[in-house]
Amino acid sequence: MANTRSASKRARQTTKRTLRNRSVLTRLRGMQKGVSAAGANPEAKDVHAMISAIDKAAKRGIIHKNAANRRKARLNKSLGAAGSAPAA
């Protein structure tokens, strides 16, 4: 339990922010599973939507900037591998 009014307000703010951030992270995880489920050839529009969502999360401080860059690099790498793979 908070001892001061400002500490109790901080606790309320933290709870609200945590819920909001959790929904964004859950959405990112769901999108990641959709891209991963596509296997070796993910759709370009899905990858671009994922990159946009990652950028927005990093801009808001929900995920770290370097973590966002790492995730985007891996997505672009998978997209590039899918584009260079021979069509069977």
Image (cartoon, rainbow, N blue to C red):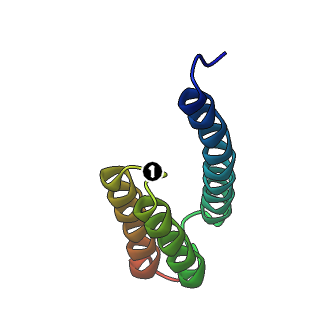
Report x, y in % for residue 20: 66, 52
Residue found at the very far front of the displayed protein? 5
Depth check: give the residue in front, 57 or 41: 57
Report x, y in % for residue 67: 37, 50
Which residue in the protein does label 1 denote?
Answer: 63
> On the picture, is 75 further left or further right than 36?
left
Residue at left 60%, top 29%? Answer: 5
Which amino acid, mark 1? Ile
Q: Is residue 76 visible?
A: yes
Depth check: give the residue in front, 68 or 10: 10
Give the class, few, some or many, for how many residues have Cα within 10 Å of label 1's Cα (few <14, many ≥20). Answer: some
Q: If the image is split into quadrants, where does the N terminus sit?
A: top right
Report x, y in % for residue 77: 37, 67
Report x, y in % for residue 22: 65, 46
> On the picture, is 72 further left or further right than 8?
left
> On the picture, is 30 further left or further right than 32?
right
Depth check: give the residue in front, 54 or 44: 54
Q: How many numbered marks have been drawn onto this rendered protein structure?
A: 1
Residue at left 61%, top 19%? Answer: 2
